[in-house]
Each structure stands twice: as C-alpha cells, then as structure tokens.
Amino acid sequence: MDGKNQYFVNIGTREISINRNGNNDEFIINADREELLLLREVFNEMYNSDTRAFFRSHVPFVEYHKDSSNDEYDEGMTRALQMIYDLGDDTTRHHISGMGVLKDK
C-alpha cells in the first residue's frame, strides 16, 4: 500500500492512533509518515490557537468575532478536515461530505 498505514483519528481530541481504542475512530485515514506529521502539525496549531482563545475568553472587552485565535482555530479545523478527507477511506469521505463543512465536497 505504497508506505501508507491505517490510522484512527478523533478530531475533537486531536488523537491519531494506529490502534482502534474507545472513540478514537471517528475518521479512518491512510497516511505515510510525512502526511501523518503534517496532520499532527495542524492539530498542534489548533491546540495552540485554542489555548490562546481560552485565555482571551477571560478578557471581556475583546469580542469573539474580533479574536484572531478563534479565526486561526477555525482555519485549522478546516485544514484538518480537508487533510482527513483527502487521506480518508470511503466512509470518512462520505461522513465529511455529509457534514457540509468543506467547499465542493
């Protein structure tokens, strides 16, 4: 399978695992090492944006829609879903298409 392995992905917990365990199989992808590292990088960026947004949420005079951390998180989520769609099996692609979150999918 051209150096690709199957992984189970839970985007909510940002988990990528080679083993199916609990609820970590929200999405199933087939990825090589480089693709896996790119997805991990997107998840790390999402975590950092989420952390900044958490601290911003305690500052009442900064409005949600004017917070760049929220925008970065949303962009990261879109990038992650696009990568998962591209790497996903048929069930994963169908699930993401049904969510209606990606353009033209």
Image (spheres, rainbow, N blue to C red):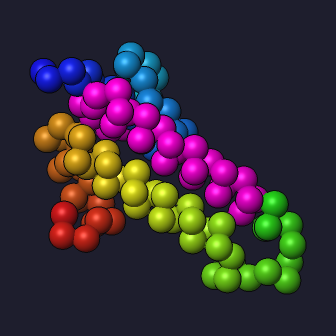
Instruction: Decide whether residue 88 is among the magenta residues.
Output: no
Query: In the picture, which quadrant includes the N terminus?
Result: top left
Q: Which residue is drawn at 24% across and 41% down?
A: 87
Q: How many marks?
A: 0
Task: Name the residue at 67% across, 83% down.
Answer: 66
Question: Is 53 located above or below residue 51 in the figure?
Answer: below
Quadrant of res 8: top left
> What is the x, y in percent for residue 22?
46, 23
Query: Residue, x 37% and y 19% (percent of image)?
Result: 18
Question: For the C terminus, which image quadrant?
Answer: bottom left
**Height in image: 13 above or below 99?**
above
Q: Relative to residue 103, is residue 11 depicted above or below?
A: above
Q: In this view, does 62 lie above or below 55?
A: below
Q: Position of residue 26 (x, y in %)?
A: 36, 37
State the residue at coordinates (36%, 53%): 81
Q: In this view, does 42 lie to the left or right of 4?
A: right
Please state the extent of the stretch shown in magenta in the rendering.
25-54
- In the rendered image, residue 97, in percent from the top left (x then y), is placed at 22, 58
Q: In front here: 72 or 23?
A: 72
Furthest residue toward top? 19
Q: Quadrant of residue 54?
A: bottom right
Is 40 magenta? The answer is yes
Q: Is residue 51 left or right of residue 65?
A: right
Q: Is residue 54 visible?
A: yes
Residue 10 visible in the snapshot? no
Our reading of the magenta stretch's main secondary structure is: helix
